[in-house]
Amino acid sequence: MASGKSAKLDRLFDVALVRPPPNSYSNCISTNPARSEIDVVLAKEQHRTYVSLLKESGVTVVTLPAVEDYPDSVFLQDPAVLGTVRSVLGRFGAQSRRGEEEALRLDLKKYEETVGKLNQVKAPGTLEGGDILVTNTGLFVGKSQRTNPDGIGQLAGFLPGMKVKPVMTKLFHLLCGVTYLSDGIMIISPQLIEKSNFPGFRFIEIPEKDAYSCDALYLGERRVLIPSGFPYTVTQLKKAGYVTVEVDVSEFYKGDGGVTCLSSPIYTIL
């Protein structure tokens, strides 16, 4: 499988890995009061739609097998940050998810020509992909409940020459409140994340009540994938010159997951 860079696209990846929800998905870790209402059949349908939207945007999607032993494994962003030259497998802060890293390592053996050299975060470090914000100028990494300073330090050591800046956050993951789009622009909920953490960037500001939509995925050519049901976010993105693509991820919201959580891009800048 080749990564196939496209000169005309301004996104930071051309290939993304996904893993379908397992039948055990309703047992995932979640603080959402609606967790008990998760519909696994609907989750699988929503995941297929998500994958179709990625493909329609020209992303090469690699579907890995579902892993029944790990209910949260559909959130494939979390075990690693992947690049075409260098990749880093994390170490989960959530004890029950440890082991997903090894499952991903085994799957990646089939794609050694696509994914860069694999490095591994070791104890006592913890690092989860939901805390890693990849931009065109470097990485911002949330110091959160799930990612600790030791894990961030190991990540920086694996990426010599790449800017890796820690960002304090009280959020579950950093990307719950901010994501990078393009052209030095981030979408952010400033009530949750201080804009001063990201000097030199411009911002599309979203109020805290709509912060779930800040977990967005830039698809290239000014197209942004966001969860459905956030008209204010749609308006703000359109004002900034972006085209919104909405996807229903209600069953993943119930599992404390968002749009970026459902895929692991292979970044061309790493």
Image (tube, helix red, strand yellow):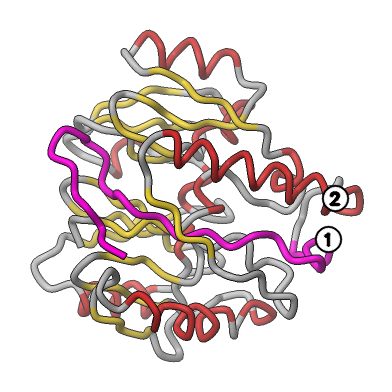
**Distance Cα–Cα, label 1 vs label 2:** 6 Å
Q: Residue at x 86, y 49 (%)?
A: 39
Which region shows up in magenta?
A: 1-29
Secondary structure at numbered mark 2: loop
Q: Nearer the viewer, residue 184 or 101?
A: 101
Report which quarter residue 95 is drawn in.
bottom right
| Residue 2 on the magenta span | yes
Q: Are marks 1 and 2 in contact (CB under 8 Å)?
A: yes
Q: Residue at x 33, y 66 (%)?
A: 82
Pinpoint residue 44: horizontal percent, then vertical percent: 73, 51
Q: Residue at x 54, y 68 (%)?
A: 64
Q: Nearer the viewer, residue 121 or 102?
A: 102
Pinpoint residue 125: horizontal percent, then vertical percent: 42, 83
Which quarter shows the N terminus?
A: bottom left
| Residue type highlighted by circle 2 | Ile
Pinpoint residue 249: horizontal percent, then vertical percent: 68, 39
Q: Is residue 171 above or below residue 144?
A: above
Secondary structure at numbered mark 1: helix
- Majority secondary structure of magenta residues: loop
Q: Is residue 27 above or below residue 157?
A: above
Which quarter shows the C terminus?
A: bottom left
**Numbered tag placed on residue 38 in the rendering:** 2
| Residue type highlighted by circle 1 | Ser
Q: Is residue 218 left or right of residue 160?
A: right
Q: Is residue 231 above or below residue 41?
A: above
Q: Nearer the viewer, residue 145 or 4?
A: 4
Q: Residue furthest left?
A: 161
Query: Does label 1 or label 2 sit earlier along the sequence?
Result: 1
| Residue 129 on the magenta span | no
Q: Is residue 198 above or below residue 110?
A: above
Task: Say few, some or many: other residues with alpha carbon within 10 Å of mark 2 (under 14 / 14 to 19 / 20 or more).
Answer: some
